[in-house]
Amino acid sequence: MTWKQKLEARMPAELGREIDIFETEIALRKAGKVEERLFAETRLRRGVYGQRYDNGERHDGIQSQKIPFPTAETKGPTTLWDAPGMQRIKIPFGGLTAEQMDALADVAEEYSDGILHVTTRQDFQLHFVHIDDTPDMMRRLAAVGITTREACGNSVRNVTACPLTGVCRTEAFDVTPYARALTYFLLGHPDTQDFGRKFKPAFSGCKHEACGLAIIHDLAVIAATRTRDDGTVERGFELYVGGGLGAVPHQAKLFDPFLAEGELLPIAQAISRVFARLGEKKNRARARIKFLVAKLGLDELKRLVMEERAKLTPDPRWTAFLDDLHVTDDKPLKAAAPLGGGPFPDGFEAWRATNVYAQRQPGYVVATITCPLGDLTSKQMRRLADLARTYTGDTIRTTVEQNMVFRWVSEADLPAIYRELSEIGLGEAGASTITDVTACPGTDTCKLGISSSRGLAGELRRHLSVLAPRLDESVRGLRIKASGCHNSCGQHHVADLGFLGVSRNVNGRRVPHFQVVLGGQWTENAAAIGLAIGAVPSKYIPEVVRRITDAYASRRQEGDTFQTFIKRIGKAQVRDLFKDLLVVPSYEQAPDMYRDWGDPREYTIGDLGIGECAGEVVPFIQFGLAASEREVFEAQIHLDSGNVRRAAEMAYTAMVTAAKALVRSQNADVSDEPEDVAREFRARFHDTKLFHDTYAGDKFAMYFLHAHERGLDGMSAEQAHRLIEEAQHFIDHAHSVNARTNLGAGAAGAGLSAPATPNAPPAGAAE
């Protein structure tokens, strides 16, 4: 019997057939018998992505030894067929067995670069995977119950859930069996195959914590109970719909304050049918269900869903799983025993203080394995599988903070587990603290990355780990998250300190920057969305973190959370803390500022500016874009003070100012009237696609044009918040277009002078 036959004997027949079909589709595409657009969606629905191809080297020094990477001379492969890509692997509710961990370790080592990356939605990603290897990889995974189906594409993505559910001390009940049921009910369901965009569900066992981050998802399911008249307790859910991060985040809306548990699957099916029928299909930028909720209104959406629910043909799967909700229960491997009195290994007490959670079951704890930047090696994964077999059994879960947890650990076994974790480099303390920085792949492997979020996160981890013993207690529990682009995969909007990768053009050279995002709230399932208050050169971000956290530690009042502190002192004062860091030194003064974290190359190469009369010649467009930055920040100040109308006006004005700066580079005679600016912008930048250097460019252009067309009357605080977010993205992209096309060179308005000597970098801000 061949190895493939052995695997097929363990695979569900339907899943094996799907993998065979995908292998055939690969062959047909290679033969030119399937068009690329169709095949792209086919492979994405199986988790197969293209990736950034950067001479085979990740910026943090990880290097594959398997893939023949291109050189500067060969230029490297240009298609998915001769370049390795990324494979996403779905892990429903983050649950893993030791056998599955072994399989993941094997495929990472044999088909990838030996690195497993935990994502912010509890999946795994493997990079540098050749597409020809993906069918065999999928078979290896399917044999242990893991699928990549609908890990990407316009489909229902991984169903996530709180990693503590079932052992949490404060949850209403264990949501694991419900998350599992929804996963396999919607997987491949006919009613979920015609979405215009992705659909992300999430479960949380309680409302006040953040483990599930439910409110930022398309479908948010939060456990709830109520007591009947006869005194019995009924299970159900607070159901929310229409959340999502991305460029402009939306918090999910309360669809039903108490949905009976038996209605979860049929209502999810009905919502899927409405989304598939009425969701946007042509404009991908507005195709998520959050835009459908905003367009229809919650009441109308609910009416349509309930109407659809009444039409559905009854399906026994809706309630069959309720007959055995214990099917997903963890089975402890060892009896509970108390922790002894020591002596303990070096570092154990610090690790225990941050990485151990006492379960509601006496004598048992959850131990968090901190995975720096979400990464661990195949060797480490195998050792973790062995640890699970020895101490916990199949009770492992991934987390949205890119870590892993062992559940049902007997307290007495903690020292031994810590000792073994330390031996394999996974005994780091600080889980869920300020040193446990979350980041998306950024420029390392993502084609959309603008700035190196992983590089920044790694630097912040090193910087803060050194400072950790001296950090004020109020600062240690803060969350930092970084995204390399506007898509928000690093979830920067809901961090205490969020960072969003952008770029700026300084005298003909590109400089990596990060927007500083404040106002987000991690707890209560992501209860608040932050806004950007200023773009800072990437190399200054550690200094920004130091100044803001120092201010919080020294100036906070009794009872202040980080969010209430920021609100009390105001974002204007916070921005003043680092306003000197907004200025970029010249290349001659600080060439390192023109490189990204972990990358020795210049971020971009451009001609030096030409000095004149003790000043540098600055095109008008740069003054216009700078003015728009100021205006969008003022919009935030008005919103924070409760002046919604003025906030919306300033956000719209900021977009007009940025658009006018672009337009005047081509037509110096355009008037200041918004109508003229919008008309000229549409003709010169939107219709010509000059603004559309990426797929996002079209989306950002429409932010301005839609705002201009719809007006500001009756705008709510939530809509004003959204408009400010849209304005910031429009301005950031205007910077990008200017840098790419050098619009200001020789254009109208050139010749205005700016100070010749920018501020020198502050001491300690960058090495």
Image (cartoon, rainbow, N blue to C red):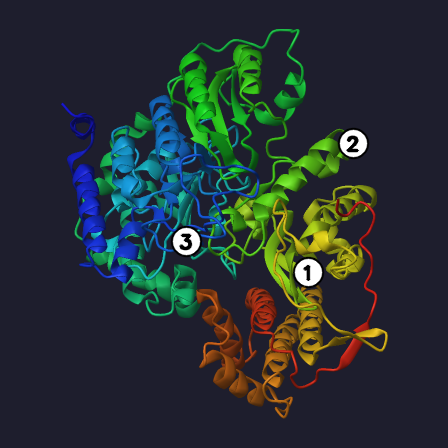
Q: Are marks 2 and 3 in contact (CB under 8 Å)?
A: no
Identity of the amino acid at label 1? Ile
Secondary structure of the residue carrying numbered label 2: helix
Secondary structure of the residue carrying numbered label 1: strand
Q: Residue at x 47, y 71 (%)?
A: 692
Marked residue nearer the N-terminal end (2 or 3): 3
Secondary structure of the residue carrying numbered label 3: loop
Residue topped by disc 1: 533
Kindly give the residue lying farthest to the right in the view shown.
Answer: 614
Mark number, residue 470: 2
Asked if residue 187 is positioned above or below residue 425 in the image, the reply reads: below
Asked if residue 229 is positioned above or below residue 537 in the image, the reply reads: above
Residue topped by disc 3: 218
Q: Residue at x 63, y 26 (%)?
A: 429
Examine the image and state in which quarter residue 626 appears: bottom right
Residue 163 image point, x, y percent: 46, 33
Identity of the amino acid at label 2? Arg
Identity of the amino acid at label 3? Asp
Please indicate whether residue 271 sits to the left or right of residue 315 in the image.
right
Q: CA distance from mark 1 to mark 2?
A: 28 Å
Q: Are marks 1 and 3 in contact (CB under 8 Å)?
A: no
